[in-house]
Amino acid sequence: MHLLQINWDINPEIFRIGSFALRYYSLAFLLAFSLGWYLMHRIYSEENLGEKELDKLFMYAVISTLLGARIGHYLFYEPFEVFLQRPLEIILPVSFTPSFRFIGFSGLASHGAILGLLIAFYFYSKNIIKKPFLFILDRVVVPISLGAAFVRIGNFFNSEIIGKATNADHGVIFSRLGENFPRHPAQLYESIGYAIIFFIIWYIYWKTNRAKQPGFLFGLCFVLMWTVRFFVEFYKEPQVNERADWLLNTGQLLSIPFILMGAYFVFNATRNKIAS
């Protein structure tokens, strides 16, 4: 056994009762939302906002994340015919073919989740909190960056979104997939990157006045997160085999507009003086 080689053979299911199974992936989502609620509670207390608004934010975030991620997965990574043939399976954690069974929410696209969150937060800012759209975006990026780190850890437990072979002695052997050679733990690369971004955004929010420049934290988080995603994709196996020969894969192509969007908001925010 090499010191820099890990044989990963963990069962992704914590326990199973009939067709229902609790997975580490689901636990990662639960931790992400729970910590997200705690972090936003601290931020809302700092901003003199109440728990009533926070509870509604939590509801908006959970629903839009799951719906956006599921719809995004089927739009970006599956044949469009699947989207048309089994629409209920996109939004429900069950399968009707070949028979009814509980399968959970497998197949979640982070780009779709972000689009779903942006739409939800827009309506939340207009109808619930009654504050500018960028006000809420500059604050929710704090828990979103940490939540993304937990999701990638869940992918690692699932032995999915795997990295390319290292062609060396170091790496992770996903023996559950029937493999005997090491791969890049791309899920962990991405998770560590997101965790670092969380600490950067968290520090800037609490220790600087940048949160008073509308769009700065949101833009910075987008630039950093999607840049991490863009470069880690070079170490991943393609998620769509038919696109394996593309110069850039689907995840990278979808990340570029978000990076540019973030850069625009950072540039625009730095042009404005910090409000006193």
Image: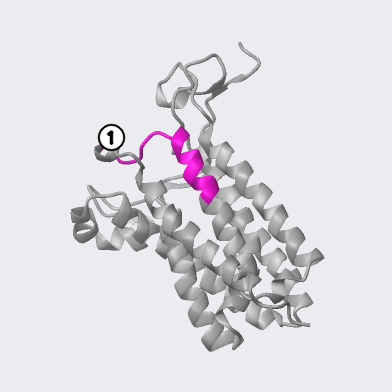
Residue at point 51% right, 15% down? 168
Q: Position of residue 186 (x, y in %)?
A: 52, 35
Residue at point 22% right, 47% down? 98
Hey, which residue is sitting farthest right in the picture? Answer: 207
Q: Residues within 10 Å of mark 1 (few under 14, many from 20)?
A: few
**Magenta-drawn stretch, dominant element (helix, strand or loop):** helix
Please determine whether, in this image, residue 232 is positioned above or below residue 103.
above
Please determine whether, in this image, residue 38 is positioned above or below residue 1.
below
Residue at point 18% right, 55% down? 81
Q: Secondary structure at mark 1?
A: loop
Q: Say which residue label 1 marks.
A: 245
Q: Amino acid at mark 1?
A: Asp
Residue at point 61% right, 86% down? 131
Q: Position of residue 102 (x, y in %)?
A: 38, 52
Q: Position of residue 214 (x, y in %)?
A: 63, 76
Residue stretch rendered in magenta on the structure: 227-241
**Colouring convention used in this rendered image of the protein:** one colour
Residue 265's image quarter? Answer: bottom right
Residue 234 colored magenta? yes
Residue 36's image quarter? Answer: bottom right
Q: Which image quadrant: the N terminus?
A: top right
Q: Nearer the viewer, residue 15 or 154?
A: 154
